[in-house]
């Protein structure tokens, strides 16, 4: 069991997406030796799939924009259960992080006078998303990697961390294995930053890549850290629904930001039928006014297709359930119509949405400049995650930090499009800075051989089991979550899911794999399953307790908001008996000066 190599760093970063890379760069710049572990190859992080842009109040397209409006939009989109301090820091610091990325070599789209171009996006009052066509995430990763390789960061590619190591209540390292050969490795570190992304692979239909199995959430939970807001899972309104082989692949919100409209099978723009009161003074009530907004008219109100993602997703499901959906169970997203309005409409679409043009051409045989796309909701993003302190990004366990999607607080009950990429930069930087400071203030802790041996034994257990194939268990788990804990929830299916998750625990504990540790994808899947179970149970139990509808959490049996529940978050932690405990905890009151900003921007 003790056959492993040991690697020492001041700061260990787990995850090499936007948050992990930015954290690594910052920690290294502060003089810390940094190890960066990525489950896949460097450059293959899920961040590359973020298409629309990064939100920052640069005010390059509309000079009325500022951090206060961005803060108010973020809080309103999150239904005011956000960590207000994180929302404040994000809005204030996002412009500097975007300009910093530009200085490091990011090539943004430009306004005629040479400034960074910004586009409209759902939930944002003004054009706010700095973008590179519809490939913004790819440009972010390219830039961060090109800058980061000169910082002396040690990169451990194709490695998976399966357990955090603790000494006297403080995280002092991690246990993992390399995915190619299956060899064990112990990472000894003064501080650990988790930047592992989301949990989308707990569902059958998702825009998330294979890495998104809730690793960081489960690592933190098992190390004693709190999770919060796990019931808030965002179902992006526009994923591909056909062909079935590509079901769930994201169709960027940038399509709607550039003028794409949603229609049902009758050709009707159904989003005009349901505009929430909170957005009526900002949303167009006719097609002409919406088109003017898309074209940059400051006096026009935005089209209803650019309402928040949770609302748009539910409106799509309403049309499908009413029998007004597309042939393959979605609705139609049409950008081809703007050719009638623009002289160079076809070239405009190809220039603004090159990835979408090629995606539908190659995968569905559709030319989006001529015909509408079929789209429907897909599991996209989890607002919940590891509870962190806003300024430092430290979790409730000393020495353990988190940033990006696996950290909770910024987005509240629903994330606005584009806030994710600027989130990675703002809080990746903060996590790296404060983890480096923590590492410099603390010496290396003691690695407990018993913890290492226990982790190794658990990791190898599937080779000795005589149970099911892990792929079958994963498929069944995804179906359970999709059918019972999806976009529309109610008590009976949630109770059924909780009961089934108890059965899944037994099945997961006994999954069996054959062969050896080299190139064994079945083994890798078996080791992902316990993480998927943790996040699935946390999500389902929290959704069962929140008997109201708020943001991305919609209860068909409790369709209205409960003001009392709007003042609490559900904290998830591992009990001393090993069972999951969930407790309601009050949300900190918003300070008067920030409350005034919210009121002024309603």
Image: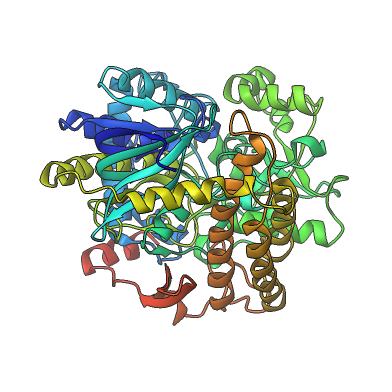
Position of 64 with respect to 354 (left or right) is: left
Where residue 333 sits in the image (x, y, percent)? 72, 40
| Residue at position x 50%, y 32% in the image | 45
Q: Against 86, is 549 above or below?
A: below
State the quadrant of the N terminus.
top left
Q: Residue furthest bottom?
A: 564
Is residue 66 positioned above or below 282 on the image?
A: above
Is residue 363 at all visible to an observer of this figure? yes
Q: How many marks?
A: 0
Query: Depth check: 227 or 103 in front?
Result: 227
Quick check: can you spot residue 62?
Answer: no
| View extreme (left): residue | 441
Instruction: Specify the quadrant of the image occupied by residue 513.
Output: top right
Image coordinates of residue 336 in percent, x first then y, are 73, 30
Q: Position of residue 377 (x, y in %)?
A: 69, 50
Residue 543: quarter of image: bottom right
Q: From the viewer's perspective, is 244 left or right of 193? A: right
Image quadrant in which the C terminus is located: bottom left
Viewer-proximal residue, 11 or 568? 11
Q: In x, y percent, where is residue 15?
A: 42, 37
What colour scheme has been applied to the protein in the rendered image?
A: rainbow
Residue at x 63% of width, y 44% of height: 463
Q: Image point 54% across, 75% down: which residue?
A: 546
* 297 versus 450 height, above or below: above
Left or right: residue 179 compared with residue 466: left
């Amino acid at each position: 069991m003790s056959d492993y190599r040991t690697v020492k760093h001041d700061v260990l970063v787990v995850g090499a997406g936007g948050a992990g890379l930015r954290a690594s760069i910052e920690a290294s710049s502060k003089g810390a030796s940094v190890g960066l572990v990525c489950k896949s190859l460097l450059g293959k992080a899920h961040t590359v799939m973020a298409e629309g842009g990064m939100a920052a109040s640069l005010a390059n397209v509309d000079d009325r924009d500022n951090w206060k409006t961005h803060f108010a939009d973020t809080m309103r989109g999150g239904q005011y259960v956000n960590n207000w301090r994180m929302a404040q820091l994000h809005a204030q610091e996002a412009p500097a992080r975007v300009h910093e990325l530009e200085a490091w070599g990011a090539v943004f789209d430009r306004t005629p006078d040479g400034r960074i171009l910004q586009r409209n996006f759902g939930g944002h009052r003004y054009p706010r998303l700095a973008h590179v066509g519809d490939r913004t995430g790819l440009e972010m990763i390219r830039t961060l990697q090109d800058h980061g390789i000169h910082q002396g960061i040690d990169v451990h590619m194709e490695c998976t961390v399966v357990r955090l190591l603790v000494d006297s209540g403080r995280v002092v390292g991690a246990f993992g294995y390399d995915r190619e050969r299956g060899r064990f490795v112990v990472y000894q570190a003064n501080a650990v930053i988790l930047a592992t992304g989301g949990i989308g692979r707990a569902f059958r239909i998702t825009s998330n890549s294979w890495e998104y199995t809730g690793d960081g959430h489960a690592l933190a939970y098992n190390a004693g850290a709190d999770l919060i807001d796990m019931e808030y899972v965002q179902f992006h309104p526009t994923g591909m629904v056909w062909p079935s082989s590509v079901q769930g692949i994201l169709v960027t919100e940038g399509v709607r930001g550039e003028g794409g409209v949603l229609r049902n099978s009758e050709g009707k723009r159904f989003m005009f039928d349901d505009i929430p009161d909170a957005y009526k003074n900002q949303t167009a009530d006719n097609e002409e006014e919406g088109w003017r907004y898309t074209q940059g008219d400051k006096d026009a109100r935005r089209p209803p297709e650019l309402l928040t993602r949770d609302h748009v997703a539910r409106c799509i499901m309403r049309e499908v359930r009413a029998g007004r959906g597309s042939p393959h169970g979605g609705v139609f997203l049409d950008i081809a119509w703007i050719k009638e309005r623009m002289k160079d409409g076809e070239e405009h679409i190809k220039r603004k949405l090159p990835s979408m043009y090629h995606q539908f051409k190659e995968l569905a045989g559709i030319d989006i400049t001529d015909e509408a796309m079929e789209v429907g909701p897909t599991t996209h993003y989890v607002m919940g995650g590891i509870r962190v302190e806003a300024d430092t990004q430290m979790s409730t366990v000393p020495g353990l930090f988190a940033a990006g999607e696996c950290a909770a607080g910024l987005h509240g009950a629903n994330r606005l499009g584009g806030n994710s990429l600027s989130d990675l930069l703002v809080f990746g930087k903060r996590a790296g800075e404060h983890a480096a400071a923590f590492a410099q203030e603390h010496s290396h802790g003691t690695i407990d051989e018993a913890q290492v041996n226990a982790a190794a034994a658990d990791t190898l257990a599937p080779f000795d089991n005589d149970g099911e194939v892990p792929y079958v268990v994963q498929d069944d788990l995804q179906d359970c979550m999709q059918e019972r804990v999806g976009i529309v929830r109610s008590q009976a299916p949630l109770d059924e899911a909780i009961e089934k998750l108890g059965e899944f625990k037994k099945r997961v504990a006994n999954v069996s794999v054959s062969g050896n540790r080299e190139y064994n994808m079945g083994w890798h899947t078996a080791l992902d399953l316990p993480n998927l179970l943790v996040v699935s149970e946390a999500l389902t139990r929290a959704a069962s307790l929140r008997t109201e509808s708020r943001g991305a959490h919609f209860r068909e049996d409790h369709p209205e908001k409960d003001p009392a529940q709007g003042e609490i978050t559900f904290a998830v932690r591992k009990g001393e008996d090993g069972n999951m405990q969930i407790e309601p905890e009050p949300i900190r009151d918003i300070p008067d000066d920030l409350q005034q900003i919210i009121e002024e921007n309603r």
